Image: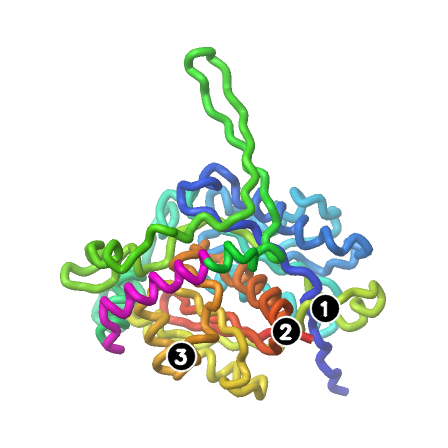
Amino acid sequence: MTQALQEVYIVSAKRLAVGRKNGALKTTRPDDMLASAIRAALAPLPELDHEEIGDVIVGCAMPEAEQGMNVARIGALLAGLKDCVPGMTINRFCASGLQSIVLAAQRIALGDAELMIAAGTESMSLMPQIMGNKIAMNPAVFMGQENLGIAYGMGMTAENVATRWSVSRDDQDAFALESHQKALAAQKAGLFTAEISAFEVHRHQPDFATGHVKHSTMTMDRDEGPRADTSLEKLGKLKPVFMTKGSVTAGNSSQMSDGAAALVLASAAAVKRYQLTPLARFAGFSVAGVAPDVMGIGPVAAIPKVLAKTGIKAQDLDWIELNEAFAAQALAVIRELALDAQKVNPLGGAIALGHPLGATGAIRACTVVHGLRRTRKRYGMVTMCIGTGMGAAGIFERL
């Protein structure tokens, strides 16, 4: 006898403010960020029996060094969860945080758990380089052209997208400026307040005059990325980073960042038993592959799949969090799918707010869930391109 899938609800969603690489969070460990995000997500739900949490699933794009050793389990323990609550780290590069939500939702939908925690964490400050400690690519990648795109840097794939989809430098810079302007306006209006949990940063610095170590603290409750001094003139003066005559610059690319987020998911039974108020329903997810050398176009393949799977029409989407890995790919996706630009990243995107890789999907899920409730809109989507040529898209419904 086939058992019907259970509905899955988001009952809490919290994130830390995102720090610039080598910014306020540069010495903060990713497992400490994760622990803080988990505690923040659980804080509004004191009635939950933590022993009923089936698992803590955490996305991390570079799970090594300070964010290795199954950072999910370590972060869960540091957060104060009981020993009986397990943890699992997963990696789908830039979609890792979103994938953690999907896996947690699937466990509940199948009746395998009633409560789950999904999260993401990433410190790009503490990782020695964006590709990790040791690059050990399969030699077959370089033997002929068939798989060479796997070795392409993300910037080169953005240049490929800009060329093939005819995205001009002027359009990329204008898109980048708008990302900063929207993020700054959202900060001024306090639109991130509901999703951000203040984080106390501890700093230890040697005082050579006294021979002592000075300890100081600061509270971080505001994303560091948005720049009030950004202008088209300044963006236009930046040189291409990845190709001599290219159009992709540091100014129209996502910022490397540090951050973490956590969401609590619950079954209908758990919602009823604990008298919880769902923030949203998890409606569906799809992932798809594209050519690695144009990886940024991934959402073009993933979005139609999730719309078909859920029976939701593109025009019914009220809020679209499209990760701005690069302005070139974001614009190409918007144009190729004829997305309503007014619904895409209404509070700014990764060019302004930052992109802490494996944490981004969970962070942007917090933004869309709280944004839907604040605006009383119905459907929101989180979507992004993924390294080596993939795209992912997940849909949430405000109840």
Q: Quadrant of the N terminus?
A: bottom right
Judged from the image, the secondary structure of the residue bearing numbered disc 2 is loop
Q: Are marks 2 and 3 in contact (CB under 8 Å)?
A: no
Q: Is residue 200 magenta?
A: no
Residue 318: x and y, percent? Answer: 54, 78
Q: Amino acid at mark 3?
A: Val
| Label 2 or label 1, whichever comes before in sequence order | 1
Residue 6: x and y, percent? Answer: 73, 77
- The residue sitting at 61% across, 64% down in the picture is 370
Residue 239: x and y, percent? Answer: 19, 55
Q: Which residue is mark 2?
A: 376
Q: Amino acid at mark 2?
A: Arg
Q: Is residue 171 above or below residue 309?
A: above
Q: Amino acid at mark 1?
A: Pro
Q: Which residue is mark 1?
A: 278
Q: Which residue is mark 3?
A: 300
The residues colored magenta run 164-184
Residue 308 versus residue 313: which sits nearer the camera? 313
Quarter occupied by residue 217: top right
> Spatial distance from mark 2 to mark 1, Cα to Cα?
14 Å
> Spatial distance from mark 2 to mark 3, Cα to Cα?
27 Å
Q: How is the image coloured?
A: rainbow
Label 2 or label 3, whichever lies nearer to me, is 2
